[in-house]
Image (cartoon, coloured by chain):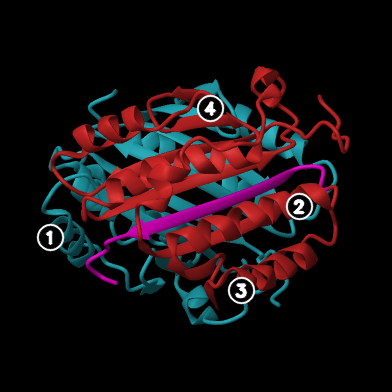
Chain colours: A cyan, B red
Amino acid sequence: MPDKTPDQPRIAGVSFSLYPMCDNFIDLILSAIKKVDSSKVWMKTDRVSTIVRGRIPHIFDVTQAAFLEIAKTGEHVVYSATFSVGCPGDTEGHAYMDADEKTLNRELIEAVDQKLSAKFALYPMGGGNYMDPIYEQIEAMKDHGVDVELTHYETMLEGAAHNIFNGLQSVLQAMEDAGSSHTVMTTTLSANSPSA
Amino acid sequence: MPDKTPDQPRIAGVSFSLYPMCDNFIDLILSAIKKVDSSKVWMKTDRVSTIVRGRIPHIFDVTQAAFLEIAKTGEHVVYSATFSVGCPGDTEGHAYMDADEKTLNRELIEAVDQKLSAKFALYPMGGGNYMDPIYEQIEAMKDHGVDVELTHYETMLEGAAHNIFNGLQSVLQAMEDAGSSHTVMTTTLSANSPSA
């Protein structure tokens, strides 16, 4: 199990899925994945989701770009993800931690201006005062220009995709910087919903 | 905040979404929800998901029935959910805890024979030895006739919908019976996937 030091960040990962609500969902997913440069992450798709692992900026960059490639078609699409850092079982495939922090998909991402309705939840594992960092990070989300609303089990977010992804990435990074031993964060991001 | 006693189970809840990957997703969702009897649960849909709260058997019964109503059309559909018991913020709407345990949608559910690919993750909050109950519950899942495979961040499940839902409900109930102060469980259930 790798320990975190200032020089050596820990490997982060996400199990994520894209759900385009349309008949041509397969084409949309395959073409989005083809356009995204995932050369700085470990990536594997199974029967239920895709696992992306590596440095925090890259796992957000790759999954955000794939999502926005579909969202920009105007179809209703949902991004559902479980982020994790420090999972006790997460011990293999660290080669990608040698990548630098320069993200590869900024151009794709910045070309799409997309509003999202979203939810997120933070689970700091193994600690007694786990509600304090949760409330702190909900508060911090507002600094990213995201509208925040409390609801059952999760926190509702509304705003630009750019701001919401920045906010989510900052939450995970802040938990790492604070020395959290094992952090899980789930999120559901909805684009072009007819109910919005 | 309600304390759990043997006579008075705590309110459980789930934030869940159904994602039919087809052009007529709205009709499928609305018609499924219309067919399900949700009179023993508190239920509210927002811009991202639907919250269902009440006794454990009913939150599974209602959401499983809605999911299978869509799955039986043969369309690829995903059920994504975050279950929670004992969330410190979860203090209102306890009226539905007076309902008896008799589930209302067994007929709908038993009429559908559906194979699923799935993942689940268990997050016992606030405790130091949180990995032990996780490994125990992964093991217990096998007693329900579900194929279990370890992967990153979550556990992969394969089997009949009936067995997987029974397994998931048993995990949440077992955590309650063991006195867990706050349990979160996430799951993604995929039916009729072209990649299966």
* Viewer-side label of 2, 1: 2
- Crowd tier of the residue under label 4, counting other residues whose Cα lies within 10 Å: few below 14, some 14–19, many 20 or above: few
Q: Is mark 2 on a helix, strand or loop?
A: helix
Locate residue B99 relative to residue A160 in the image: left or right. Answer: right
Please rate how many residues cluster around mark 3, counting C-alpha atoms within 10 Å: few if below 14, some from 14 to 19, many from 20: some
- For disc 4, the chain is A
Question: Looking at the picture, which amino acid does disc 4 mark?
Answer: Asp
Q: How far apart are marks 2 and 3 (CA)?
A: 17 Å
Residue B183 falls within the magenta-colored stretch: yes
- Was residue B41 drawn as part of the magenta stretch in this picture? no
Judging depth in this view, the residue of A40 and B45 nearest the camera is B45
> Would you name the residue on which mark 2 appears?
B175
Residue visible at 69% across and 76% down in the picture: A2
Q: Give the range drawn in magenta.
A: B180-196
**Amino acid type of the residue that numbered disc 1 sits on in the rendered structure:** Asp
Q: Which chain carries label 1?
A: A
Residue B142 is labelled as: 3
**Mark 4 in CB contact with mark 1 (< 8 angstroms):** no
Q: Name the residue under label 1.
A: A27
Question: N-terminal of the two: label 4 or label 1?
Answer: 1
Label 4: element kind: helix
Q: Mark 4 points at which residue?
A: A143
